[in-house]
Amino acid sequence: MPELPEVETTKNGVAPFCEQKTLEHFVVRNGRLRWPVDSTLAEHLPGNRVKSLSRRGKYLLMHFEHGTLLIHLGMSGSLRVVETLAPIGKHDHIDMLFSGGYILRFNDPRRFGAFVWHEGPAVEAHSLLSHLGPEPLSGDFSAEYLVSKAKGRKVPLKQLVMDAKVVVGVGNIYANEALHAAGLHPLKSAGQLSHPKAQRLVSEIKRVLQRSITQGGTTLRDFVGGDGKPGYFAQQLNVYGRGGEPCRHCAKPLTEKRLQNRTTVYCTLCQK
């Protein structure tokens, strides 16, 4: 599933082709996504200018003058910039043609993605966004904040940092990597988190996410950026996908377990 760095990479890749551009056509070939795409979008969106693009958690927000289009890539979706004569693929469900002659094309084999329209301002109050915690790369996500959220919690530490109500965008890949880099055991109770440990974890979450964004995201199966190119952070993964292989720090075989039906990989020697 595309995580925060992949969505940020997509935003950065497609922004030059749609920001301050007028949407000329909105074509829906298959609107049966996670939620049915509003059939009226093809009528009332064309002719409107995109003011800006932003990201909130894993949602890409396309801000028009009178509302915002919330886009989620789902488990296998991608947004790519293509030329007008580019052949249409089997899973190319939505096309957005902008002034300048480029198409923003949404491809989603599993159809878990979403295009949701929010009329008017205050998109942060939308039900899909209103419950979200702070952005992990912002100043609001700090050791003090994380300790306050962990206090008294018995859930595993990895589960805590993957909770979007606590902090957005720390998906499975990056939670594994950050916990390993911080030397913290993913299955330990969150309530045991001290301020020094929280400081290490917050710093590593920020570092790992920023490094992945710089590398264009992590391509494990489906993800490509807005330019159609894969991300390269997968080449730098220290634990995720390496269960049973030697830890790069101590050479002890990495342990792999399932936590909430997600793969958890860690080193029993380096992570306490």
Image: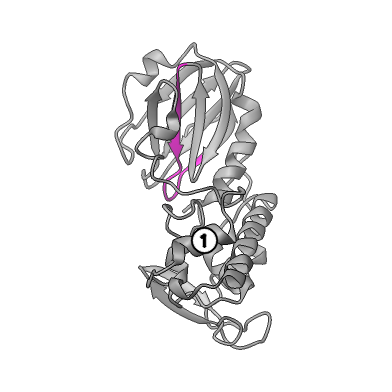
Residue 206: give x, y in percent of width and height: 63, 57
Please give the range of residues in magenta: 66-78
Query: Between residues 157 and 89, which one lies in front from this camera angle?
Result: 157
Q: Quadrant of the C terminus?
A: bottom right
The answer to whether residue 83 is above or below residue 261 is: above
Quarter holding residue 196: bottom right
* Number of numbered discs overlaid on the protein picture: 1
Give the amino acid type for the residue marked by disc 1 in the picture: Leu
Q: Secondary structure at mark 1?
A: helix
Residue 41, visible in the rendered structure: yes
Residue that badge 1 annotates: 146
Q: Residue at x 41, y 20 (%)?
A: 120
- Residue 113 part of the magenta-drawn span: no
Residue 116: give x, y in percent of width and height: 38, 31
Query: Between residues 71 and 94, which one lies in front from this camera angle?
Result: 71
The answer to whether residue 41 is above or below residue 8 is: above
Query: Seen from this angle, which residue lies furthest top?
Result: 47
Left/right of residue 261 with respect to residue 211 in the rendered view: left
Residue 85, visible in the rendered structure: no
- Residue 73 part of the magenta-drawn span: yes
Q: Residue at x 45, y 55 (%)?
A: 166
The answer to whether residue 169 is above or below residue 150 is: above
The answer to whether residue 86 is above or below residue 245 is: above
